[in-house]
Image (cartoon, coloured by chain):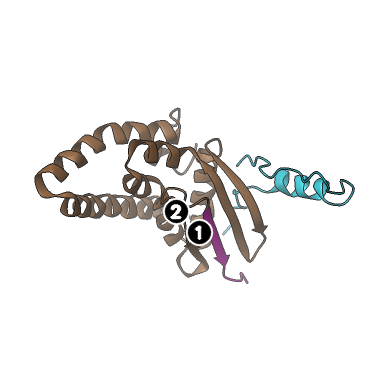
Amino acid sequence: MSVLDDYLVDPRLSLLDKTRIQAQVLVPVLRALRSELGKERADAIVKQALRGWSKQLFAAIGDGVDGSPRRKWAAMHTAMAEMTEHDVTVEMHRHDKEALEFDVTHCRFAEFFRALGEPELGALLICETDFDIAAAGGGEVSFTRDQTIMQGAPSCTFRYKFAPRS
Amino acid sequence: MNVRKTRERKPDADASETSVPAIIAAAESRMKVEIPRD
C-alpha cells in the first residue's frame, strides 16, 4: 500500500508502463490539436491542462497524509522514489537532515519521451510532478532543479533543502 | 532507489583510499528519505 496508489491507478503497473499508456492516447490528441491550432497554442492548452491536473492530484494526495508538510512531502517523495528506482540511475551527493542532493544520470522516462519526439509531454507527465510533490512540503521543503535529461541535459540536478525541525 | 555505480574506476587510482569509500557511499545512498512521525 503506497500513498501514490491512486496516482498509479493499479499498483501492479510500473510508472513507466503507466506513462507509456498515457502517451499512447495523449500524443495523437496533442498532434491533432497542433495540426488544428498550431504548435504553440496546442502545446499551451495541453500544458495548462496537465499542470492543473498534476497540481490538483498531488495536493489531494498530500491532504490525505497526516502530519506536517515535511511528513507529507517525505511520504510522497519516498513512494515516488520506490516507483522510479528501477528506471533511473542516481549519483548521490548529499543526504542529511539539512539537504538531499543527487543527480539522475540515466532516465528511462526521458529515453522514452525523447525517442518519441515529445520531451515536453514527458516533462509534464513525469518531471513536473517533483515540484507538485515538493509543494506539499510547504515552507519546510524547498526544491530546485536547474536541468533535466528530458530537456536534453546530461543529468537532472535534484536539490532539496529542509527547514530545521524543532 | 537502487543506486548503480556509474563512474569508471581510474586506472591509476589507489584502491586502498579512493574506490572503496566511493562504492560504500553509492551503495548506501538512496533517494528515499525517512518519513517523520509528525
The image shows residue B36 at horizontal and vertical percentages of 60, 57
In the picture, which chain is cyan? Answer: B
Report if residue A54 is visible in the image. Answer: yes
Q: What element carries label 1?
A: loop
Name the residue located 42 percent from the left edge and 58 percent from the top edge.
Answer: A131
In this picture, residue B34 sits left or right of residue A4:
right
Amino acid bearing label 1:
Gly
Q: Nearer the viewer, residue A76 or A16?
A: A16
- Residue A130 circle label: 2
Q: Report if residue A118 lies within the magenta region.
A: no
The image shows residue B23 at horizontal and vertical percentages of 76, 45
Report if residue B36 is visible in the image. Answer: no
Q: In the image as oriented, which residue stretches furthest toward the right?
A: B16
Name the residue located 45 percent from the left edge and 27 percent from the top edge.
Answer: A12
Q: Mark 2 lies on which chain?
A: A
Amino acid bearing label 2:
Asp
Give the residues drawn in magenta, as a range.
A156-166
> What is the chief secondary structure element of the magenta stretch?
strand
The image shows residue A104 at horizontal and vertical percentages of 55, 48
In this picture, residue A62 sits left or right of residue A71:
left
In this picture, residue B37 sits left or right of residue A141:
right
Q: Nearer the viewer, residue A65 or A88?
A: A88
Name the residue located 63 percent from the left edge and 39 percent from the top edge.
Answer: B2
Please say if A33 is above or below B36.
above
In the picture, which chain is brown? Answer: A
- Residue A67 circle label: 1
